[in-house]
Image (cartoon, coloured by chain):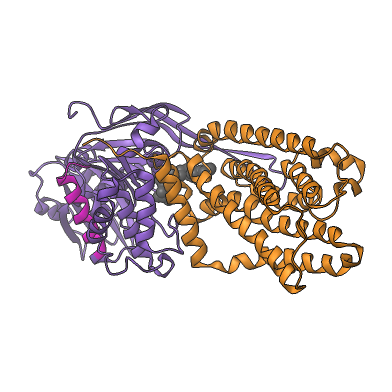
Amino acid sequence: MAPNAYSRGRSLVAVLRLSVLTFLADPQWLIPSLIAPVVFGLVAYELFSGAGPFFVLYAILGAGMMSMWGQTLYGSGWATGADRHLGTLEPTLSSPTPYLYVVGGRVIWNTVAGLFGGAIVFAVVAVTYGRPIPLSDPLDFVLMFLFVIVTLASVGVVFAAAYVYTRYAGFIQNVGEFAFYVGTGCMFPVVLLPFWTNPISLVLPPTWALDALRYLAIPGYQGFSWGFWWDIIGAVGTTLVYLVIAGTVFKSVERHVLEVGDLNDW
Amino acid sequence: MSAHPVIHTRDVRRVFESRKGFFFNELVRTEALKGVDLDVDAGEIFGLLGPNGAGKTTFTKIVSTLLLPTSGTVEVLGFDVTKEAHKLRPRIGLVLGGERGLYNRISARENLRYFADLFGVPMERRDKRIEEVLERVDLVEAADRRVEEFSRGMKQKLHLARGILHGPEVLFLDEPTIGLDPKSARETRKLIRSLVADGVTIFLTTHYMFEAEELCQRIAVLSRGRVVAQDSVAGLRKLVGGDRTIEVEAYGFDDGEIQRLRALPGVSRVVSEEYGPRLRLTMRVRTNELELATIRTMLANHPELALRERRTSLEDIYLDLVEEEAS
Ligand SMILES: Nc1ncnc2c1ncn2[C@@H]1O[C@H](COP(=O)(O)OP(=O)(O)OP(=O)(O)O)[C@@H](O)[C@H]1O
Ligand SMILES: [Mg+2]
């Protein structure tokens, strides 16, 4: 009897299915990742509604980003942390499916869930104030929105790799969280930050993509002075760098954990 | 295949390095395996015994591709575990057991389905196969309940079901019956035997001596990272000095008496231990020539002398080997 062979597609689907089932088993955890952004969005609306519709949009975009950020970026890494915690990392690694596909399936799921979270924030703010968010070109906006989330996912894959690599990844992530919120400019414009923080912002792909999104959505937006297309180039470039880093790390990460033997510590 | 052992290891060493202290500044080195040579043949049930911390789980993880050896040769089904793990994984099964290692929020069936997909159990056979293994471990009724509602024993059974799901040729079981009630433990042993009948080679660790004695054709005893013996139970009996175990009990013996017992024909070993207010001598005896009556006559001056004979059990052998190693 020939041994069974795994298939990439099937493994991805299986992981997606597991993610959905786990989510449906306990959907409450979505709430914390929505509450803060929704509150932030509503407060921003109250504070800035006098400053014109586009300033409001700026703030609401930030709120949506916060929500997606949590889901897309953290979800992927967190799931691997959970695998360690549950003790499921060992049986998963003992299967013929490379762990990269397990992470891949989770990134896809978390991207979808992140989009969903972002959309909810927009919807809540729009419904609360009975006014749709002003958009000059909805189609471009949606495409750009998808692009932003791809840049987020690229950081997510790197985080997932870190989680496989070391059980201390959660610690790094907690420390980094606030820096990310501020650094990427979801909360307020990066240009308001002290100059020395700019390099930190610019190594994060979502900073570029978010800036580009704002160019699209907000007429007369200044952002980084280099303009929309340089934002796009920067976002694509940094995203590729993150994907290359993730790819390289994943090549050695499985071997590394088998060498260290701390798959199960928590 | 039968000419070549299914599991073949030479001089396997494993060192763990971990950091301790507030600043992780203290490096702790543990030598879990100090040169392990083992051979397991096709179709046998092989048992690995040893005290807590002897290195059984470490060894099991190495042969099942979950941990790399620090040095040494490890071949399973002819594949080198350090270089050909991807070829080996579809052919072997691993049951680490315990309370963890399962997705608690979803049902047993969903757990199995997920792993069936990762292991590439053919799509058209998957659902039938899941039903089959659920039946084999007697979990059909609980199959659609969340795993978090499972008792420890039910989880253990689910671990087993997952281990055999993809029809492995070699199955590694780390303490497969831990936490099971006597009936379930017996059913599990029956399951293990039926797997062997299907041609599966079994490697298991256990702390239950009777279980190893009942199941295993061959046994290795691991102590502090070293194999101190590796043979059939019969072979091990010879190694520790005899099939017969005679226990003599009284309110004390003097050294001269113990010397004379040692000198009796066929006696290979006399160990004394306190037994309440009394002293018990446990003797391993090789031959049938020595009769209990001889001993009784020798020790006739002891009031309330108790004398018993039994067949040397695996537990006796195990304790002999492990104590010898420790001293
Ligand atoms: N990940 C790890 N990091 C550091 N030391 C480890 C690790 N895993 C095992 N050890 C050490 O290696 C030694 C062997 O442990 P192992 O778990 O293999 O023993 P065991 O024979 O399975 O014991 P038990 O009967 O208690 O299950 C122990 O000293 C243990 O502390
Ligand atoms: Mg163990």
Which residue is at the far left? B289
Q: Is residue B65 above or below residue A185?
A: above
- Range shown magenta: B184-200
Q: Is residue A108 above or below residue B15?
A: below
- Residue B52 visible to an observer of this rendering: no
Examine the structure image and report whether residue B194 is included in the region drawn in magenta: yes
> Secondary structure of the magenta portion, mostly?
helix
Q: Is residue B101 left or right of residue B282?
A: right
Examine the structure image and report whether residue A250 is included in the region drawn in magenta: no
Which residue is at the far front? A136
A156 vs B279, nearest the viewer: A156
Q: Position of residue B110 (x, y in %)?
A: 38, 59
Q: Position of residue B115 (x, y in %)?
A: 37, 50
Looking at the rendering, which quadrant does residue A238 occupy?
top right
Chain appearing in purple on the rendered image: B
B233 vs A183, nearest the viewer: A183
Q: Position of residue A195 (x, y in %)?
A: 91, 41
Chain appearing in orange on the rendered image: A
